Image (spheres, rainbow, N blue to C red):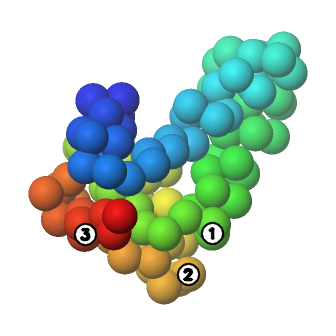
Amino acid sequence: MNRAALAVFRAGHLPVTGEALALPLIEQAGSAHLGHAAFDELFHPLSRRLVARCDGVLRIGRGSTGADEMVALARAHGKTIFTDVAELPPVAT
């Protein structure tokens, strides 16, 4: 994800991953593993909020129930789904 985020940045966009936002909060809340109450409180809920506020979603990688949920949520919010950094629109300057 970080490799893709770097490519997104280099393409002129502002990449934001749910993990980059959630993991420090989860650690601050006293958890670092799946199944812990703080992890469950923050990890997916933060990503859901993020998807509702972003311009689009870049879906990369192999199968992931969580990523598939974020894509479905993004579609429900009318967001564009990209599957490759090369698909991103040019950035207006």
The quarter of the picture where residue 31 lies is top right
Could you tell me which quadrant the N terminus lies in? top left
Identify the mark nearer the N-term, 3 or 1.
1
The quarter of the picture where residue 34 lies is top right
Residue furthest to the left in view is: 86
Q: Is residue 56 left or right of residue 22?
A: left
Q: Is residue 67 above or below residue 30?
A: below
Q: Is residue 81 above or below residue 14?
A: below
Q: Which of 48 and 80 lies nearest the eye of the viewer?
A: 80
Q: Which of 53 and 77 lies nearest the eye of the viewer?
A: 53
Identify the mark nearer the N-term, 3 or 2.
2
Residue depicted at 38% across the width and 53% down the height: 13
Which residue is disc 3 drawn over? Answer: 89
Disc 2 residue type (three-letter): His
Point out residue 53 in the picture as x, y percentages from the top left corner.
63, 66
Q: Is residue 36 left or right of residue 59?
A: right
Q: Are marks 1 and 2 in contact (CB under 8 Å)?
A: yes
Point out residue 72 in the picture as x, y percentages from the top left corner.
46, 72
Point out residue 2 in the picture as x, y percentages from the top left corner.
36, 29
Which residue is disc 2 drawn over? Answer: 77
Point out residue 87 in the picture as x, y percentages from the top left corner.
17, 65
